[in-house]
Amino acid sequence: MPKKLFFLILTFFMIVSISNAIEIDGINMPDSLMTGKTNLILNGAGVRTKLLIKLYISGLYLMQKNHDPKKIIEADEPMAIRLHIISSMITSKKMGEATKEGFFRVTRGNIEPIKTEIEKLISVFKDRINENDIYDLIYKPGMGVEVYKNHKKHSLINGLPFKKALFGIWLCDNPAQKSLKREMLGTVGGVTVKGE
């Protein structure tokens, strides 16, 4: 193969490789995630802020684009949320408290039916949290939510009711952050995702 052709092909694959990541605040969010044999595509992503501090980037991955939060929450199909930590202000204690607060909000205080599952998720955050840590919360029908930290499986949390509450933290009528909800749904602002 001529050298020139080889370098053209190499350049092409490098461009394709780069285009498979979407940059938000200097962080590359992949435009797809594999879960088993299922390819999930990035529906939308944005930055979680509190008191003007940028805490993490959150991306929602689905089998196909969907802008209806209720249908996403209720769906018993593969999907995922990626959290990419971008602030050293996030501690294990604060992450645990925020997670519990999110479940209280989405269940309107009735966390009892999924209390054990919530505690299991919070236990994932007990290890030290550092900038650039990545958490993947991947729902697999018939199994539950697989929780990964930095691409290593941490635990499996069973049950569709837990999955609905978990995704509801970001997508319910009273979400963690309304602007982030819109960005994850790919409806307003945030990232322009390919295919939109």
Image (cartoon, rainbow, N blue to C red):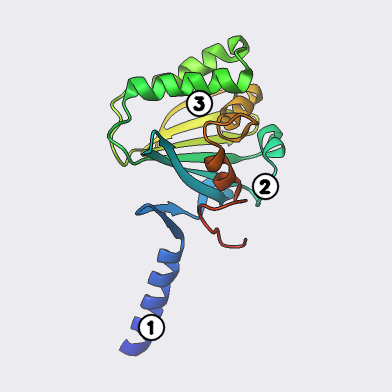
Disc 3 to disc 2, C-alpha distance:
27 Å
Q: Tell me if residue 123 comes above or below residue 137 in the rendering.
A: above
Quadrant of the image occupied by residue 144: top right
Q: Which mark is residue 67?
A: 2
| Three-letter amino acid code at the position of disc 2 | His
Tell which circle, 3 or 2, labels the residue nearer the N-terminal end. Answer: 2
Tell which circle, 3 or 1, labels the residue nearer the N-terminal end. Answer: 1
Q: Which mark is residue 8?
A: 1
Q: Which of 55 and 17 is in front in this view?
A: 55
* Image coords of residue 176 (percent x, y): 52, 31
Q: Nearer the viewer, residue 11 or 31?
A: 31
Relative placement, left or right, of 37 versus 93 is: right
At 52% across and 41% down in the image, what residue appears?
Answer: 180
| Three-letter amino acid code at the position of disc 3 | Leu
* Image coords of residue 151 (percent x, y): 39, 40
Query: Most extreme residue toward the front, as rendered?
Result: 51
Instruction: Tell me whether the residue at label 3 lies in contact with that at label 1, contact meaning CB atoms closer than 8 angstroms.
Output: no
Tell which circle, 2 or 1, labels the residue nearer the N-terminal end. Answer: 1
The residue carrying pointer 3 sits among few (fewer than 14), some (14 to 19) or many (20 or more) residues within 10 Å by Cα, namely: some
Relative placement, left or right, of 193 versus 22 is: right
Q: Which mark is residue 156?
A: 3
| Three-letter amino acid code at the position of disc 1 | Leu
